[in-house]
Image (spheres, coloured by chain):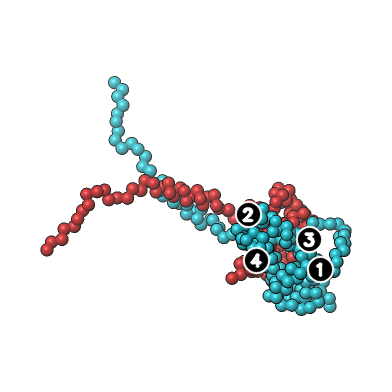
Amino acid sequence: MKFNKKIATSQQDIPTSSLPDIIFMLLIFFMVSTVLREVDIQVQYTLPDAISVEKIDNKRLLSYIWIGNDERIQIDDSIIPVNAITNIAYQKRMNNPNIIMSLRIDKGSRMGIVSDVQQELRRADALRINYSALVKL
Amino acid sequence: MFRKKKRPGAEISSSGLADISFLLLLFFLVTTTIDVDTGIDLVLPPWVDNAEQVAVKSDNIANLLVNEVGDVLLDEKIIGVPQIKSEMIARIKSNPKLIISYKTVRDTPYKIYIDVMDQLKLAYTDLRQEYSREKFGVPMDQANEDQIMEIRRAIPQRISLAEPTQAEG
């Protein structure tokens, strides 16, 4: 018996002309959702974990303060002393009144430094804070 | 005389367009951080120059004290961290005006502080969920904006952060 390979008479290639459109759509999605990382983190820290954590919807309101395991404090791109926080936080709050200060603190830190930072923030009237924590499973 | 010459195949090929978009797409894929920030929200009390003392009836205060090794004292009695939630729920239910005064010493580890804060937040979340179910018949994440505002008014979070003291000795 002889097998004949059937060849369909209809057109067989998938049209690829709309491929760029789909790619563009994806591209635009990622362009819009991207927040470019603008600082280098110079301190080492491990975040604590907690159960009752909430997601922060609006990333653009956030401003970070890092406190590393050696108790150095970083805001934006520089390591700063505790008593400089008030001025910086005040400036930030002037530019953005609804600012949320996100405290990314190493879980081995002592409360003394955390409290000092909080006092500085209170002086600057930047009262909305957020203790950055991971979700505990 | 001037006749327009017809040249064959004068269109620009657009097959490279997809490649270029792919390249851009890859760039944004790589630079995007999808992970959302999570954390515990808190609103600090405003700064006052000379701390005015507000007298609060001592019945309305729950004193929570954490020492430098992470032992938790609730009104002079030692309590385990996982028990704080249920204890606080019971107390707030019996006295809705309860203010939790949360105090640490300067050497308290931050991790313990967050653990205890987590318990307090969990207690309030549970109470709010319960209120929402009783009053509106839906869990809090399904309640609408007005209902959430009302729940927040009905069960406010009263956590007072006291300044940590230097550990003695």
Q: Colour of chain B?
A: cyan
Q: CA distance from mark 1 to mark 3?
A: 23 Å
Q: Nearer the viewer, mark 2 or mark 4?
A: 2
Amino acid type, residue under disc 1 in the picture: Ile
Q: Which one is nearer the viewer's eye here, A62 or B56?
A: B56
Q: Position of residue A98 (x, y in %)?
A: 70, 51
Q: Nearer the viewer, mark 1 or mark 4?
A: 1
Q: Position of residue A119 (x, y in %)?
A: 78, 60
- Say which label, 2 or 1, has the lower sequence index: 1
Amino acid type, residue under disc 4 in the picture: Ser
Amino acid type, residue under disc 3 in the picture: Gln
Do the dots labelled 3 and 4 sit on one chain? Answer: yes
Question: Chain letter of disc 2?
Answer: B
Q: Nearer the viewer, mark 3 or mark 2?
A: 2
The outermost residue toward the left is A1
Left or right placement of residue B50 versus residue A65 in this view: right
**Kind of element beneath mark 2:** loop
Within 10 Å of disc 1 (Cα), the crowding (few <14, some 14-19, many 20+) is some
Quarter holding the N terminus of chain A is bottom left
Residue at the image position 38 percent from the left and 43 percent from the top: B14
Q: Which one is nearer the viewer's eye here, B56 or B169?
A: B56
The residue pinned by badge 3 equals A119
